Amino acid sequence: MILLSPTTQDFLKKSDVNKTGYLDLYEFTDYLIEHERHLHFHFKELDQNQDGKLCLDEIQGAFKRIGVVITTEEAEKLSKR
């Protein structure tokens, strides 16, 4: 028996639409498409000037909005990931 983390178990439970106990290709693909939609939505929220890139000010601003102050150097490191 394979032991799965609670996060993985939750993912499988939510994604296993037909309740077979495993994910088929279609269920997995649906999950990926939905996840990509969420990422795209959040990226657009962060990309304040809508140029398709996150600049240092946008990165720092995003952190500031959630109460975390990061330096320009830290923002630069994040932008290069």
Image (tube, rainbow, N blue to C red):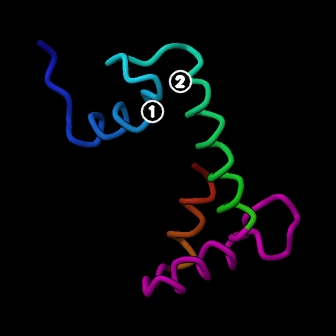
Mark with earlier residue (2, 1):
1
The residue shown at (70%, 59%) is: 41
Q: Which mark is residue 28?
A: 2
Q: Quadrant of residue 4?
A: top left
Amino acid under disc 2: Phe
Q: Is residue 24 left or right of residue 47?
A: left
The residue shown at (86%, 68%) is: 50
Q: Is residue 36 left or right of residue 18?
A: right
Q: Quadrant of residue 46?
A: bottom right
Say if the magenta span includes residue 38: no
Q: Is residue 49 left or right of residue 35?
A: right
Q: Which residues are magenta?
A: 45-70
Q: Nearer the viewer, mark 2 or mark 1?
A: 1
The residue shown at (62%, 59%) is: 79
Circles 2 and 1: CB atoms closer than 8 Å: yes
Q: Is residue 6 positioned above or below 76 on the image?
A: above
Report the Cα–Cα distance between label 2 and label 1: 7 Å
